[in-house]
């Protein structure tokens, strides 16, 4: 079976992560520019004596569908590139994938990845 990894990372880590993922021969990836917040609900900024609460910050979402057996390897790889230890390093969500179909050939499952 297959897993979906949704990694929400800092935008400045995207290039290095893409490079590492391509080197690891992943079958494909989808990238979105997003806004979000975690448990700090953003941060507070001071602009000319005004306090502005910035609730959502720009992040990048990297989606990967991979064979089950590559899950641990991918999680370790993502952490190794994106972990600074500071708040806001990001999160990795993992989902089961029911099927994948390559439209060109109508193949299903792992072999369509
Ligand atoms: N529970 C959640 N549901 C949906 N998206 C989330 C959730 N937690 C984090 N995110 C997404 O992940 C991004 C990064 O989150 P972040 O790294 O700040 O998580 P955190 O739980 O606050 O951890 P930390 O305490 O290390 O900052 C957020 O901007 C948001 O897009
Ligand atoms: Mg946070």
Image: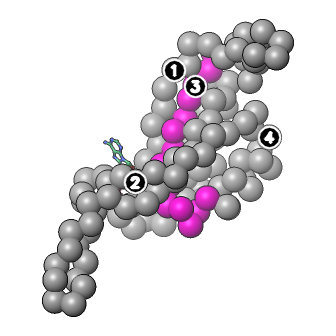
Above or below — where is 109 with respect to 67?
Answer: above
- Find out if the beta carbon at label 4 lies less than 8 Å from the nearest ligand 1 atom: no
- Please, what secondary structure does the residue beneath circle 3 have? strand
Of the numbered discs 1 and 4, the one sitting upstream in the chain is 4
- Find out if the beta carbon at label 2 lies less than 8 Å from the nearest ligand 1 atom: yes
In reply to whether residue 54 is colored magenta, the answer given is: no
Tell me if 107 is positioned left or right of 78 in this view.
right
Above or below — where is 21 with respect to 71?
Answer: below
Q: Which label lies toward us, 2 or 3? A: 2
- Give percent across and percent down for residue 82: 55, 59
Between the C-alphas of marks 2 and 3, the distance is 24 Å
Residue at image coords 61%, 58%: 14
Provide the residue designation for mark 1.
96
Q: Which residues are magenta?
A: 1-14
Cβ–Cβ below 8 Å for labels 1 and 4? Answer: no
- Please, what secondary structure does the residue beneath circle 1 have? strand
- Please, what secondary structure does the residue beneath circle 2 have? strand
* Disc 3: CA contacts within 10 A as few (<14), some (14-19) or many (>=20): some
Between the C-alphas of marks 1 and 3, the distance is 5 Å
Provide the residue designation for mark 4.
25
Tell me if 68 is positioned left or right of 9 in this view.
right
């Amino acid at each position: 079976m297959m897993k979906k990894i949704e990694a929400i990372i800092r935008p400045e880590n995207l290039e290095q992560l893409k490079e590492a993922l391509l080197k690891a021969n992943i079958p494909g990836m989808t990238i979105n520019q997003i806004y979000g917040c975690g448990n700090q609900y953003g941060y507070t900024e001071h602009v000319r004596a005004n306090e502005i609460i910035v609730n959502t910050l720009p992040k990048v979402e990297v989606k990967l569908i991979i064979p089950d057996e590559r899950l641990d390897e991918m999680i370790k790889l993502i952490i190794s590139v994106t972990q600074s230890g500071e708040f806001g390093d990001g999160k990795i969500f993992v989902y089961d994938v029911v099927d994948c179909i390559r439209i060109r050939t109508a193949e299903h499952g792992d072999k369509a990845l």
